Amino acid sequence: MKEIIAMHGWAGDSHQWSNWEKIFKSCDWEWQTSERGYKDISPNTPKWNHNSNQVELKRVAICQSLGSHLIDKEILHSATHVVLINSFSRFIPSGKENRPIKLALNRMMNAINTPNEAAMLRKFHIKAYKPNYLDVKSFESNLLHISDAGRLKLKNDLKLLMNSDSLPIGLNNSAKVLIVNSKQDYILANQTKEKLAEDLIHHLETVPQIINLQDEGHSMTKIKNIKKVKHWLEFDHAKNMVKQS
């Protein structure tokens, strides 16, 4: 039995996982997505389908960016494997890089629920997908369908991002963790990525593995890279079964 629960990041939604879902479902993975409900999509907090502790069971939490801090803590705690895509423990670095990042985040916060909101979100998503192409025209309607409840979540979740300073609550120290870093990430500072790896090494029983992607931005889109994550999960799954048999 192998199942996945995926959590998107700030200002995202569950639709971003469509290619992931197709690829994993075609190989008999059970797939569910968490949804914050910023836009015209109902919030959703799925639960694991299988709760036994048998050797073959694999529960994988896949989190993009702030998603590791947004995912339900019980889901994270009972995950056997965790994939952290351009994620962080502390978003704002403690060194000299932090001043422009703080200013940019404050500008984003101040734009929510103002006439500048759509322009701010558009700029954020273009930067998150860079260097990959984002069809802005097809994305425009999403920027205009944010509910009042969604705006409140946008603000509160941005505060969570700004105040983050430790690993996400609930991360089990026995989980096997894969860190996926994009080399052309225009959102996360290098120091932020280094801090996550350092914190995980201190927290986990097994040293986390790292994949560095040369041709991706903050939002991971390429099918070949999705398949790299799938290969890691399936190789590790087979290896575990051999050890336990």
Image (cartoon, helix red, strand yellow):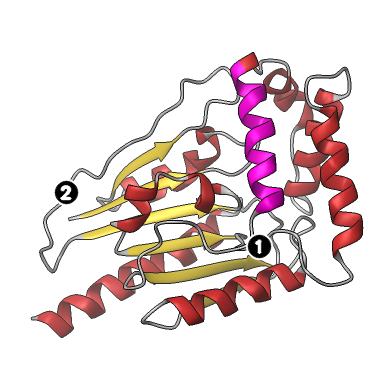
Mark 1 falls on what kind of element? loop
Task: Point out residue 95 in the picture as x, y percentages from the top left corner.
Answer: 83, 72
Which quadrant of the rendered structure holds the N terminus?
Answer: bottom left
Q: Which quadrant holds residue 113?
A: top right
Q: Dot 1 corresponds to which residue?
A: 90
Task: Point out residue 232 in the picture as x, y percentages from the top left corner.
Answer: 40, 71
Residue 91 visible in image = yes
Q: Is residue 206 magenta?
A: no
At label 2, the amino acid type is: His
Residue 147 visible in image = no
Q: Residue at x 13, y 69 (%)?
A: 55
Q: Dot 2 corresponds to which residue?
A: 50
Q: Residue at x 59, y 49 (%)?
A: 66
Mark 2 closeness class: few <14, some 14–19, many ≥20 residues within 10 Å: few
Q: Which quadrant holds residue 177?
A: bottom left
> Gap in Å between the C-alphas at discs 2 and 1?
32 Å
At label 1, the amino acid type is: Arg
**Do the residues under discs 2 and 1 have CB atoms within 8 angstroms?**
no
Which contiguous range is marked in magenta? Answer: 149-163
